[in-house]
Amino acid sequence: MIGKKDLEHIGWLARIELSDEDKEKYTPKLNSVLDYFSELDKAETEGVEPTYHVLPMSNVFREDVPTASLSQEEALSNAPKNQHGFIKAPRMM
Amino acid sequence: MATINELRERIHADSSEEIVAEYLEKIEKSKLNAFITVSKESALLQAREIDSKGHEGPLAGIPIAIKDNISTKGIQTTCASKILTGYVPPYDAHVIEKLKAAGAIIIGKTNMDEFAMGSSTETSFYGPTLNPWDTKRVPGGSSGGSAAAVAGGEAPVSLGSDTGGSVRCPASFCGVVGLKPTYGVISRYGLISYANSLEQIGPFGSCVRDVATIFDVIAGHDPRDSTSVNREANYSSALKNDVKGMKIGIPQEYFGEGTDKNVERSVRDAINTLEGLGATTIDIKMPNTKYALSAYYVIAMSEASSNLARFDGMRYGLRTEDSDWHTTFSQVRAAGFGDEVKRRILLGTYALSAGYHDKYYLKALKIRTLIKQDFERAFADVDVLIAPTMPYPAFKIGEKIDDPISLFLSDVDTVPVNLAGVPSISVPCGFTNGLPIGMQIIGKHFDEASILRAAFAFEENTDFHTRQPEGS
Amino acid sequence: MYENPDGVMIGLEVHVQLNKLKTKVFCGCSTDYHNDPPNSHVCPVCLGLPGSLPVINRKAVEAAIKIGLALNCKVEEHTQFYRKNYYYPDLPKGFQITQYDFPISSGGYITIEGEDGELKVGITRAHMEEDPGRLVHEGTIDKSKYTLIDYNRSGMALIEIVSDPDMRSPKEARRYLDKLRNIVEYLDIFDGDLEGALRVDANISIMGGQRAEIKNISSHKGAERALLFEIVRQKNVLRRGGVVVQETRHFDEAREITISMRSKEEAHDYRYFPEPDLVPLKISGWAPAIKATLPELPDARRMRFVEQYGITDDHAKALTSELKLAIFYEDVAKKADPKMAAVWVCDVLKGELNYRDLTVDAFKKENMQKIIELLASKKITEDGAVDIIRTLLDKGGSPDEIVKEKGLLKVEGDIVATAAEEAIKENQQAVADFRAGKEKALNSLVGAVMKKTKGRADARTAREMLLEKLG
């Protein structure tokens, strides 16, 4: 079960600001899902390998040959803020 | 609802421009809210071009609607989220390139659950899509707009994406045909990821042939997707009205508690119909099915928590007022994502976090192995599996939205297919209280031919697919 | 035996950018962006646009294997990519594609000259990852009002080489970096002169305490400075009775100090998981073929130089410490006396180049061959040779022209003899002093001979002649 403190930590890890109201609202729902997930514990998986990729593929490459890039204009076309060809982000600290 | 063949004749006799204009008018007048963006100008322009060039290509002049999580160059692509409102991709998804090359005309982008997270199309920032059969009910999801558009006659064919049933569920609820191909058969390049190890783009149509036609156009190897497989196939040629000797498995677990009696009866009747056409049936046990839902949601949410980390308001999308970087990031996402998306990101973050990774994420992937083995064992004995697509028909808008577990439970029959990466097609197989029922035909990896053939034979011998909702 | 009085333990994480590849690691964008405007070498993949997917550059994998083999690592049978989830504006996807479990190579070592002789530094692993973009801060990172992002660098192939914490002093760390750079330069996959080609994070602890991770080190000298500062800082913390905390610190190159980056983001939880969009690699089978094409590495070349050319180990070491220099030397030695070439390249040319902040590219091998030929045939003096080298670097021309212009041809023996006789006649006091046992008086006589011959006499010959005549 997760409490308010856990939720704050997860919210920070996920970078989603949560209001007090959100925390109230989400906690029981998240816990009901986690409770449902406890079903997983019942499965016997001793010695079972995890499946990361459903098809047994390996060694897929591209050759080291340049392809067209976007123009600077295209690259910046969706950026809410930019300056002198750079994308503008908030201050770091 | 017109088929591609019918439209081809009309395009030949009249013009693509006229056909496209008719569909655009239909969309404009519709109350279904199946579309987020209608690309009227570019569609008409494209149609005129095709008309002037003489209708070359297998889909020349045929309008198609595209789920709004598939990137379309120059057309807003939002994933039905506030955070991507106004985002105009500078590139086309692989499937869009293929469709354009075949002469198809993109008429618009369809509504969906936000970032494909849902089974009802109710979590869209742009409001719910309504089911054409009963506008108080959901069309299913997450590709609800694409299915409703076809059922409502607003597009002859459309594309959706299926992460845990997002093509098959709305196909079932809206009474149309929807295909989820084998993982890797259609390039995901340009599909905005929800859970990349599970999802595939898939076509909708009013009949199996139309679905196969679109599938033929969009399937095939793409070097830009490392998980794209390299195999040649002609799926339309698999459409034979012949299931003699086909072995059908009936997985017992898919008819379990919670399955509507009328749904079960319709699907069993459908299996009988195929038996009558010469197929044989056996009961199959898939004992790990009961773990599939939990495993599916853990994997999907974990991957989603990472896939959606790029939405920070810097390069595209919503930007709130600047503070320091980390705070701005958190506020952009608080303002831009809806509740369901936030909850899934939070749960996925939790499932991958230190101390919980093995308990949730790793465990779910081990269960994925067990489920895959269930399918491998089943397909050692049978050619296809047949089961209900959804345990019940379309539910009412608002009925399940506040109870995440009950919403998850509606995916019980669709998610194992995504965990195993096998193909499945949903076809209409009955009605209950005026609402369509879908059955899914599941095949082995890369054996789309068998499921298309079974679906086609069933369709040729029944008329469920020809019924239309009022006003479509 | 080196005592290591402060119990210093240093481990380095070095990021080598594979900037000699034509394209980035997961997309086809060209790597040739250094002189181009920001955000002009980007595509949906390296810009992290929704829906884009990575595909691995085959040549980057080959280069990673080369590095692994050159560092004596084992190339793993099964390798795969992971997502490292963290957030920074230079990271367009909100995660970095890197390796975690199953790196491409691990368990190697290199040898460096340690505080007390040869030191074997363990290589924990060398793995592949993608480079983030470049951030520009107005002023310093902690004071800047906003951050500007250029994603041209985003998606460049990096090899992260993680060492064991085997180094015990900043000097050893610097030598490790020099050696590592030297090795990768030999592999011809990296141009160390390009901006951002090699970046270093340093982990350092003292007295068995917690370690600090120092980021943003961009030069070998910077690494040494940052570590020296950090040792002093940590010692001061301990002296005041404090505890060194595990944290990330930012190196401010201009002020030569490290700044704490401590904030909430310090609660790192990278939530690694395998990248679903990339399939695993099974490429250990490539290793033998790649090994066969591996060039001769610095240590091997050093030993060969000693053996083949009969030069001293110190000279061989200096010559092989830079690939270009080693190649230059061998080219010169093809047509000139190898021992003389070693002396003149190491002891003279290298110093003159360093003084002018030039590389050996600035000097033609033919000119070096000519100078050594003139020296060997005693046509010029050593002073004359130095003069030619300096003139070539400062003004250009050819050795023959310079010899002619400056009249550097060594004068004949009889002219020296005449000059010696004259010097003896004209410096009777010095002659008397010398005869009285003041050996130093001979120097002023040699000086007089040199003056008369305008420096073209060989000083040793002049001395011998004077002694003979005074005999």
Image (spheres, helix red, strand yellow):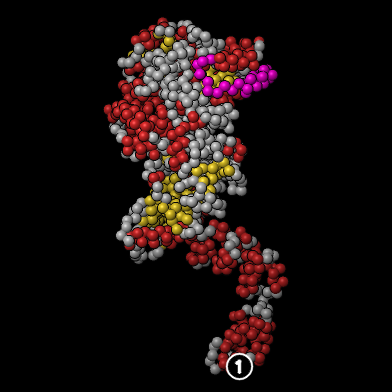
Instruction: Check disc 1 and give the amino acid type.
Output: Gln
Q: Is residue B339 left or right of residue C337?
A: left
Give the percent coordinates (x, y) of residue B317. Answer: 52, 34
> In the image, residue B16 lies at what x, y percent?
63, 16
> At 35% from the left edge and 21% from the top edge, which residue is drawn?
B406
Q: Which residues are magenta?
A: B30-57
Task: Give the chain letter at badge 1.
Answer: C
What secondary structure is marked by label 1?
Answer: helix
Question: Looking at the image, can residue B350 be seen?
Answer: no
Is residue B437 rendered to the left or right of residue B90?
A: left
| Magenta run includes residue B40 | yes
Res. B280 image quadrant:
top left
Residue B162, placed above or below residue B323: above
**x and y percent of residue C415 in the render?**
69, 83
Total numbered labels? 1
Q: Is C122 placed above or below B40 here?
A: below
Residue at the spot x=51%, y=28% of the render? B78
Q: Would you say residue A60 sits in the magenta stretch?
A: no
Residue under pointer 1: C429
The residue positioned 30% from the left and 28% from the top of the image is A35
Q: Which image quadrant for residue B267?
A: top left
Residue A80 or residue C232, whichever sits in front: A80
Of the 4 image quadrants, the one containing the N terminus of chain B is top right
Nearer to me, C333 or C455? C455
B217 sits left or right of B144 in the view: right
